[in-house]
Image (spheres, grey):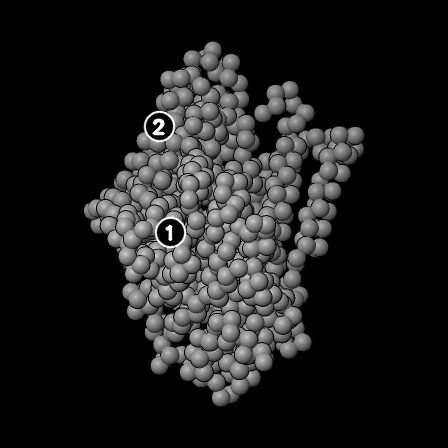
Amino acid sequence: MTKHMLKRSMFLLLSLLLVAGVLAGCGGNSEAGEGSGGKKIKLGVLIYDATDSEVVAFKNYYEKYIAKNYNVEFTYSDTINTAEQEKAAIENFISQRIKGIISFSNQDRLASIAMCEEAQVYYAVGAGTLSDEQYEQVKDNKYYVGSIGPSLDNEEQVGYDMAKYYIGQGAKNFLLYTGGYPFVSMHKKRTDGMIKAFQEAGVTYAEGSNGNIGTFSGGGFTIDTMTGFPDDSGAFYGTAGQKLGASNLEVVITAALGVELFGTSISQTNPNLKLATVSSFTDAYKSAFNAEPPQADYLAGKFASSIGPIFAAVYNAVNGDIDSVRDNGQAFRLAQGYWTAIGKEQFNERFELSNNVETPAYSKKDLDTVIKATNGDTDFESFKQFVEAYTYEDIQKLHQ
Amino acid sequence: MNLLWTKHKSTVAASAPVIGLILLAVLYIVVMQGDITPYNLNIIVNQLMITAVISTGAIFIFSIGAFDISLGAATAVSAMAGVLAFNASESLLVMFLVCLLVGVLISLFNSILAALLNLPVFVTTIAMLSVLNSVIEMLLGGQSKLSISSEAAASADTLLVKLSILILFFVICLFIFRYTPIGRQNKFLSANPVSAKQTGLSRSKLTIIAFAIAGIGIGLAAFLTIVRAPVLSKTTASSVGMDVLIALVFGGMPLSGGARSKISAALVGATSVVLLNQVLLALGFSSGVNQIAKGVLFLVVVFVASIGFRDKLLPR
């Protein structure tokens, strides 16, 4: 054997060893299927961004709490940005013999549900809702379990409450960030809520052309708007910096991302601005609320274990007890709104309960009350009551 | 031993992609414990289809030693044009033709621009990537998604339609690449550009032909993209460029093109990548580990594939 050949063989051998090492050491869990309670039930979770702090918090709850307390094993998709990726992720789940899918992805839900029906896999929307039109099409599908998440009414109320709060505080100079208005329905609804609050305060709103955001005048208020998302050009942040630097600006209310898009700009241009937004009780917001001066002042946010009830529903379905979560024989569509935190103190209290994986907001004891296998008396009504009692105060009562 | 190795190493290197594919297929059967349903096979076919079609056309580009970084964006633009055409006409045929036309036009524009400016094609495709991404934004018109109804797409979303497109396109490309002067000239052009020029071969002409064929692949893939998932967004097909590159390397295509270019690399590579993915998933590996394993295997494949020609005078 020549020296060259020896070197190549060594390289090949080392490469193969590296692959073997990677495969052996970094996450192979084919043996994890056998748990103390028999073979574990495999559930797939479709995620929109593997690095998003909300998704990370959700995963922590499922991995560090649910998987330890129930006979289940979770598998996650890659980040899903397109309908094609969503379809491929579901195909891969089906190929892996997954029994149920909890989706946090919203590329093409009807197609996803149709695929799941064909493969006889249960599908549920983890945090969100279907439009009336979509719901009508799938409500009788026996593999579509249902959805839990903020309804469009919830979204409008959130926007209304944010604007109303600062109007009540005497603020007069606002910047409204409307995200994907009018194309993204939840952004539109939140913005509609804000508009409603300002109109009640005496502001005149003139609608924009082609459904775009319009202009505000009167009532002693100065209200500027900003729409769209960052792109490669960097124009978004340029505009944001310019608008945030406007003299006398007091409050920024966002219908889409808040600290993620405006946190740095606020720190750099106008640190005393108050930012109100809709997001989640995540580490990013903890830093923002606890910064000096704070980068965020008001949050309507999802809490990590808010996805506990949808797990319970899917768990019932895969255990053959889907009837216990069927709304008159149809898939459920339940509203679960946000927790609201104003100021650092409230935020920190809620953050603690939201992210505690030892004693989460929805513990096993709570979830067992709506799981048929552990509570034979549970039915859809009790499940509905359980889901709809979602406020911070409601959850605290559960723990008393 | 040394003599035997020297004699057969080219054969081993040339056969490595096919051997790898067979091994992956066996491994897949083993890890699935034989429990492979028609649905599983359908998944494999669905997942390899788009990459295989684009790769088949792209072989002509790679074989002349060129490289197109805008394949994904071109596919997305073609698909969006197809969706707009369908929404205006409600005809799948019109959608198909528009996808094809836009795919070919974009590809031709790339190559003609390179010929006119006398620039490497790679450079113009970089510029086109940026332009096409802007076109995508324009076509979206401020919306986050463009779509046709699932029902409309469903009529073409059958294995028969999809396989027919792939097989027909592959057979035509195979014929052109192996049995017409275009294929031979492509390989010659990259293998020895100076000799090729001296024998009267026109680089510009061959480049334009190569990109036109690749454009057909892009158009077909755009149609298949809509049929598979009829909701398009800004990031539609964004991973296609990398998928094609990986598939071609796994299929044994030398990235420098030349005499060792082979049309089968597209199918072998695309199938290998999908099978590898399915094997890793069936073994229960997380997506992160999956990516690392693919990266390492990618290096191994390139290494093995290069064994046969590393010591030769001309590094192609």
Residue A2 picture location, percent across and down: 78, 30
Residue B21 picture location, percent across and down: 57, 47
Q: Quadrant of residue B216?
A: top left
Q: Is residue B182 visible?
A: no
Kind of residue indicated by mark 1 = Lys
The circle on residue B108 is 2
- Does residue B222 sit above or below B46 in this rendering? above
Q: Residue at x 51, y 71 (%)?
A: A392
Residue B232 picture location, percent across and down: 36, 48
Closer to the camera: disc 2 or disc 1? 1
The circle on residue A172 is 1
Chain to which the residue tagged by mark 2 belongs: B
Q: Residue at x 66, y 27 (%)?
A: B310
Kind of residue indicated by mark 2 = Leu
- How far apart, in angstroms, are the residues tagged by discs 2 and 1? 57 Å
**B96 relative to B203 in the view: left or right:** left
Out of A324 and B85, give the one closest to the viewer. A324
Out of A324 and A286, give the one closest to the viewer. A286
Residue B121 picture location, percent across and down: 45, 24
User: Could you tell me which secondary element the residue under label 1 belongs to?
Assistant: loop
Out of B75 and A54, give the one closest to the viewer. A54
- Does residue A195 sit above or below B194 in this rendering? below
The circle on residue A250 is none
**B21 relative to A222 in the view: left or right:** right
Check disc 2: other Cα within 10 Å, few if <14, some if 14-19, many if 20+: many
User: Could you tell me which secondary element the residue under label 2 belongs to?
Assistant: helix
Chain to which the residue tagged by mark 1 belongs: A
